[in-house]
Structures are given as structure tokens and as C-alpha cells.
Image (cartoon, helix red, strand yellow):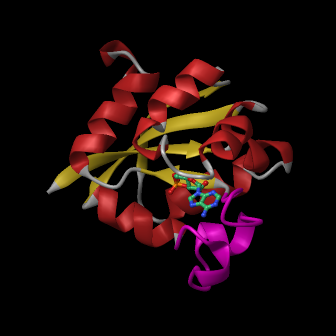
Amino acid sequence: ATNRTFTMLKPDSVEKGYIGAILEKINAAGFKIVAMKMTQMTTADAETFYAVHNERPFFGELVEYMTRGPIVAAILEKENAVEDFRALIGATNPADAAEGTIRKLYAASMGENAVHGSDSDENAAIEGFFHFSGREQF
Ligand code: CMP
């Protein structure tokens, strides 16, 4: 079925000038952009967004990274969006990511891995509404 996923082009992608190239890959893979903006997460935002990871040793580093500069947040629509987008971005660690995936092409490391993709339909909705009101979701 047609459904939606949520993505962020993380601060490293914005810093390196990869917004256009990554959006091109997203469009070429057949995703329709139904919400998009540039924004910067506060510490409280990042702590809430990544609350599931708050016991992990890398949590502090993750919050620092995600708040250090602007991101591009977007909601994407396609058949099988969540699963297909995770395939397009590749493994969390770019060293393990398949050839041609966004992380293989644009991510520096496991910590700075260029893009986010929701891991379920339920989380896609939660994460989408974290960044966008209903009237900003087209
Ligand atoms: P993502 O899977 O989008 O969301 C959780 C993030 O935590 C992940 O991307 C990485 O940016 C980060 N992360 C996951 N595992 C590690 C790790 N072992 N060390 C540092 N950062 C990590």
C-alpha cells in the first residue's frame, strides 16, 4: 500500500552541501515529498526525538551532533515507503552500507550517518508530527 516515512538530512549533510544530491536520489527512487523544511533541533528536541536511545553510551554525542546545525526534515510518500526508504539509505554504519545507497555515498561514519529514516509506519507518523503540523503535511 502507499504510505509515508519521515526523513532528516542530518547536520553533516547540510554542512557538506549534499541537500540537492540527496533529494535527487530520493526523487529518482520514486518518493513524493509531501512535507519539507529546514530547521534546527534544540537539545530538548533531540533528547525527545531520540528518547529510545537515552541509555546508550552514544546518546550525548548523538544529541550534540543532531543539534549542531540545521537539518532538512521531510515526509515522503511511496508504495512501501518505510522499508524502501531504509533500503535506499543503507545500513546505519556506512562501512556496511550497500553500493549506491545514500549512506555509502554521503555518510562519514556510524555517528555521522547523513540521513534518518523511520523504522516503522507507527514511528513515521510520530516523527512526522514531531516536526510538522497536520496542515503542513500535504
Ligand atoms: P539512526 O539509526 O538514524 O538513529 C540513531 C542514531 O544514533 C544513528 O542513526 C546514528 O547516528 C547514532 N548511532 C547509532 N549507533 C551508534 C554508535 N554505535 N555510535 C555512535 N552513534 C551511533
Q: Residue 27: x, y in percent?
A: 51, 56
Point out the residue furthest to the right here. 16
Is residue 138 in sight in this rendering? no
Say whether residue 126 is left or right of residue 51.
left
Ligand 1 falls in quadrant? bottom right
Q: Nearer the viewer, residue 93 or 9?
A: 93
The answer to whether residue 12 is above or below residue 90 is: above
The answer to whether residue 96 is above or below residue 136 is: below
Q: Is residue 131 magenta?
A: no
Residue drawn at x 53%, y 57% as measured from the top left? 26
Quadrant in the rendering for residue 30: bottom left
Say whether residue 52 is left or right of residue 60.
left
State how many labels appear: 0
Residue drawn at x 38%, y 32% as measured from the top left? 128
Quadrant in the rendering for residue 73: top right
Q: Residue 39: x, y in percent?
A: 64, 23
Q: Nearer the viewer, residue 138 or 59?
A: 59
Tell me the quadrant of the picture where the C terminus can be found.
Answer: top left
Q: Residue 113: x, y in percent?
A: 66, 59
Say whether residue 13 is left or right of residue 16.
left
Tell me the quadrant of the picture where the N terminus can be found.
Answer: bottom left
Residue drawn at x 63%, y 36% as measured from the top left? 72
Magenta range is: 91-113
Q: Is residue 97 magenta?
A: yes
Q: Residue 37: x, y in percent?
A: 58, 27
Is residue 123 in sight in this rendering? yes
* Dominant secondary-structure state across the stretch colored magenta: loop
Q: Nearer the viewer, residue 71 or 134?
A: 71
